[in-house]
Image: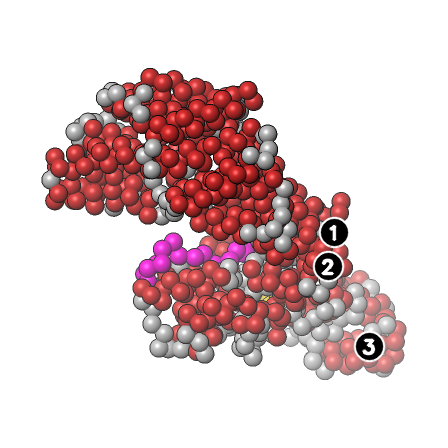
Amino acid sequence: MTENLGTLLKRLRASAGLTQEELAERAEVSARTVSDTERGLRTAIYRDTARRLADALGLVGDAREDFEHAARGARTVTAPPPLPTPPTTLIGREHELEAALAALEKNDVRLLTLTGPGGIGKTRIALEAARRAHFADGVFFVPLGATDDARLVLSAIAHAVGVTWARPPLIPAIADRLRDKNVLIVLDTFEQLLEAAPDIAEILSSSPGVRALVTSREPLHLRGEHEIAIPTLAMPREQTPDDVVRAPATALFIERARSANPDLILDAGTAGIVTEICRRVDGLPLAIELAAARAKHLPLRALNEQLDNKLNVLTGGPRDVPRRQQTMRDTVGWSYDLLDDAERALFSELSVFAGGCTLEATSAVCSAGSGVLDVLSALVDKSLVHLDREEDDARYRMLDVIREFAGEQLGRGNAAGVGARHASYFLGLASKAEPQIGGSHQELWFRRLAADQDNFRIALRSFINQGDAEAALSLAGALWQFWRSHGDIAEGRDWLRAGLALDGGSLPVRTKALWGAAWLAYHHGDYEDAETLGEQLFALSRKTIDPVITRNALTIRGIVAMAQSRFQEARTLFEEAVQLVRPLGQNWLLATSLLNLGTACVHVRDGARARSLLDEARAVYDRLGDQRFSARAAQQAGFAWMADGDIARAESLIATSLRSFWELEDVWGTTEGLEAMAAIRAAEDSSERAARTGGAAEVLRETMTIRPLAWDRIWTQRYMEGARAALGAEAWQMAWNAGRAMSVEDAVEDALGPQS
């Protein structure tokens, strides 16, 4: 019968004539190690301990080999304890689980790190991945959330894998324990212990069969590390009950809310509110769960309203989770406490941005100076800031609840200074963009302005609250054409009205704001306000010799006259405007004055002059690269041919216009193009098709605050009424409803297709 390790050690010690204490002293191990081994309390000892004891006993040759074999042969990795079992189900993480499991199956992935902000669900995903993964010798779970000393990480790992009596250094003992074993070590909540990352690398390099799955708010930055960034939960595409109950974010809310309030009913009304609640907490799982817990205390609508102050609402998490997960403030605060001074400063300053920011904006507004990229990168690594690489300029974003926490920190410091730099930067950006949105790079600049729309709102509100008329009017005046193209007519009017109500502002900025306000009022169908604003602009134009200001005043008078069907008067005003700006060169103002005059000529039945003017306008727009207004001029040229009864030429131009607007993703222009094509089909006696196209245009028009141009409506109504009478009211309505049910893409294709 083979001696066990304890019996063998006791026999060898007795043969050497040593007491336990004497052997321990010679081997430089503890007397307890010798005692526990001989009594069978330890069935294995570490390689270094076995070597020391063999040296102390004077063992050589076969005797030494037998002893070391006994020490090694009796050693086995004890079965890992069961993984923690979460009390709730994991919802909506199939993709992330598949990615983690696929990575763990790859031979070249030894270290897999799940990263993301606090409350994103990293631990839950890691536990589920560990439960589903196949490791012959099991999975060891090492919770590190309660540990703040990186020196204790090795002790925690050693304890988890059954290394309980080893003397430092621990890495050889851990590696020896796991030698030839196929195990997964899950290291949970590592972000506060990054100094211990090299120890993890050493364990992995010493134990080929060991893999590590780490959860951390930032990566470990080790060679060979494979990172999976955990995203927020997806929102429903539609707000129907069926979509809401299936989408991960809202499904999680419903499941948790019904745990708190079993009587919660999901119907057409509540589905939209649930979606809005989840959207306002950015689909962050912990925030959703904390909000859902409030469903016991508040009706859903009231809960949604309370989320204006998220950090005060998202509290009261379960007592059986770590404190950092019981409130969103504690969750974000845990990450904040791990930042150094430079990171804390930039983190708080980033709260002034809404909807994200570019690196350029961050450098201009925040105090980090030339080192901003390094500090910003650290915040991205720590999952407090997200880098969105899909846009033209990479944007850095914060989840709203994180931004709210950052704003609290900024409130204790230099909020006024950062806010002033923010407003100044975005005024400069809008001023830079203004001349570009009529040129060849207009699409790039439209996208950039749209991306920073929330930041412009903050800057405008700041200037208006300070009573800074010059800055407020400069910013609003630079943005009005963007608002028009973007469809934000009502909002633009509100900002311009608020700026114009302030005292002060130089003549150039006030006249530009009046020009923009009048145009937006016109597009809103408020011709009375447009006329009033135009007269104010005309009065100011008399105080200057600037031809542009006078041209703009004449233009507003002209479009009001057009709206009131005073076309000859409008023609005279637009003629004067063209003469004022023609000496200034081939610029956007000239092209637009030509467009206005050409349109007036259409309505006074001067088709030849209209086409000449509109062709010149298109040529200037094309030279400038303004595709949107070139398409608008093409549409008006089509109307000029319609006025002369040449429907074929009109169709070609209007189809070109519609196709351009559709390709530019210009909803306003696409709507006008469909309305014009409906009139073309009506003129071609294709009444059913005219009705379908008109119905599709009506649906688009309902999504906009821009009203149809008064003079364009004259053409569409004339032909459409005739087609309706020819088809009959019932058939017309059926075709109209069919058009309303079409997608925009199908409607454009139908409108542009060959006549059947």
**In the image, what residue occupies the spot 36% across and 55% down?**
238
Please report contact status of discs 1 and 2: CB closer than 8 Å, yes or no. yes
**Label 1, on which residue?**
367
Mark closer to the observer (3, 2): 2
**Label 3, on which residue?**
30
Region in magenta:
229-243
* 656 left or right of 33 in image: left
Quick one: label 2, few (<14), some, or many (20+) residues within 10 Å?
few
Residue 13, how many percent across, how many down? 82, 77
**In the image, what residue occupies the spot 76% across and 59% down?**
341
**In the image, what residue occupies the spot 64% across and 62% down?**
407
- Real-space CA distance between mark 1 and mark 2, rounded to the nearest whole angstrom: 10 Å
Q: Is residue 232 magenta?
A: yes
- Real-space CA distance between mark 3 and mark 2, rounded to the nearest whole angstrom: 58 Å
**Label 2, on which residue?**
414
* 275 left or right of 742 in image: right
**In the image, what residue occupies the spot 51% across and 59% down?**
282
Residue type at numbered disc 3:
Ser
SS assignment for the magenta stretch, majority: loop
Q: Secondary structure at mark 1?
A: loop
Q: Mark 1 or mark 2: which comes first in sequence?
A: 1
Q: Secondary structure at mark 3?
A: loop
Mark closer to the observer (1, 2): 2
